[in-house]
Image (cartoon, grey):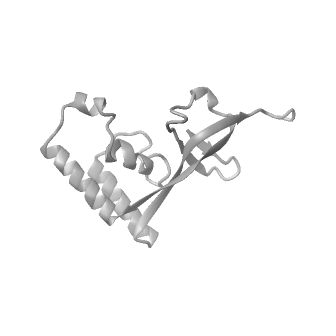
Amino acid sequence: MFLIDPETEITVKIEASEQVPSFDAELEGSEVLVTGIVSELIIDEAYLLQWEQEIKEELENPTEPEADHAEGEQGHEEGEHEHASSGLGEKADQGEHKDPFETINNYRNEIKESGTDHLAFYSIVCISFEIIPPTAAE
């Protein structure tokens, strides 16, 4: 789920958790009060090198697709890198399937353009939420 500030259009990704395993699509357009824990993902050169290594190992030793799905495809592709490609970065995947090496190079370019040695992505792991009913003026 994404929360959007209507004045600034800044978005924050809200991640499901054990306490709240999913969000109903009918929540779209609702005002929601979320209680959660802020999660930070730091992407730096060491992170990108590790990601590249994992991709190379997967290409050299591919697993059966059914095995990936059975395990929930945990790890960089669906786990940690999901944060980075969730719409929080300037050049996020927006749901498109891209070459992972291209994505890694895009992050390197973003790091270079940022003038720092890393990128930081933030999300909130949802513990609970409640829908705020519309006021009479709405």
The quadrant in which the N terminus is found is top right
Picture quarter containing residue 111?
bottom left
Say above or below: 66 vs 96: above
Say above or below: 16 vs 8: above
| 126 to the left or right of 45 | right
* Residue in view at x 86 percent, y 35 percent: 137
Picture quarter containing residue 132?
top right
| 69 to the left or right of 60 | right
| 99 to the left or right of 85 | left
* Residue in view at x 44 percent, y 49 percent: 83
The quadrant in which the C terminus is found is top right
- Position of residue 24 measured from the top left corner of the image (x, y, whole percent): 57, 28
Q: Nearer the viewer, residue 101 or 51?
A: 51
* Residue in view at x 30 percent, y 33 percent: 71
- Position of residue 123 measured from the top left corner of the image (x, y, whole percent): 53, 50
* Residue in view at x 68 percent, y 35 percent: 130
Say above or below: 112 vs 48: below
| 110 to the left or right of 64 | right
Q: Residue furthest left?
A: 60
Q: Residue furthest front?
A: 19
